[in-house]
Image (cartoon, rainbow, N blue to C red):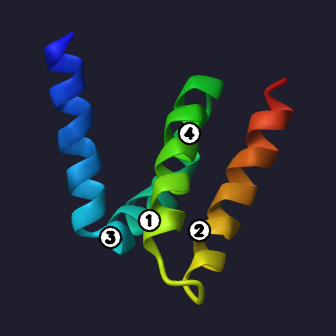
Amino acid sequence: MDGIINENMQGISHIADNPYAHLQKISAEIDKYDTRDKIDRVLDELDFIHELFEPGMQPMVSQVRDVLMERYRALG
């Protein structure tokens, strides 16, 4: 269990260090998120990024999140 927690903490730290770069990465790889499990994971990351961004930057996160939510719903 410690390995999973440590891996998750490293991922969170990486996102927190540069949330804009992580959002760019998600946007560039958006076509790879083609299952509900993959989309679930990235939606959690987007929620975290949304909280880190200034209010003026949050709409960028919302746009990506909206695209993924549409895909999520289409997968049933």
3D distance between C-alphas at marks 2 and 4:
16 Å
Secondary-structure class at tag 3: helix
Q: Is residue 7 left or right of residue 42?
A: left
Res. 15 image quadrant: bottom left
Residue type at the position of mark 2: Val
* Residue projecting furthest to the top: 1
Dots 3 and 1: beta carbons under 8 Å?
A: yes
Res. 8 image quadrant: top left
Residue occupied by mark 1: 23
Residue 61, placed above or below residue 26: below
Dots 2 and 1: beta carbons under 8 Å?
A: yes
Q: Is residue 62 left or right of residue 46?
A: right
Dots 2 and 4: beta carbons under 8 Å?
A: no
Res. 2 image quadrant: top left
| Mark nearer the N terminus (3 vs 2) | 3
Residue occupied by mark 4: 33
| Mark nearer the N terminus (3 vs 4) | 3
- Residue 55 percent coordinates (x, y): 59, 84
Residue type at the position of mark 1: Leu
User: Where is the C terminus found, in terms of image quarters?
Assistant: top right
3D distance between C-alphas at marks 3 and 1:
5 Å
Residue type at the position of mark 3: Ala
Dots 3 and 4: beta carbons under 8 Å?
A: no
Residue drawn at the location 14% of the way across and 18% of the way down: 3
Secondary-structure class at tag 2: helix
Residue occupied by mark 2: 61
Residue type at the position of mark 4: Tyr
Residue drawn at the location 67% of the way across and 67% of the way down: 62
Residue occupied by mark 3: 21
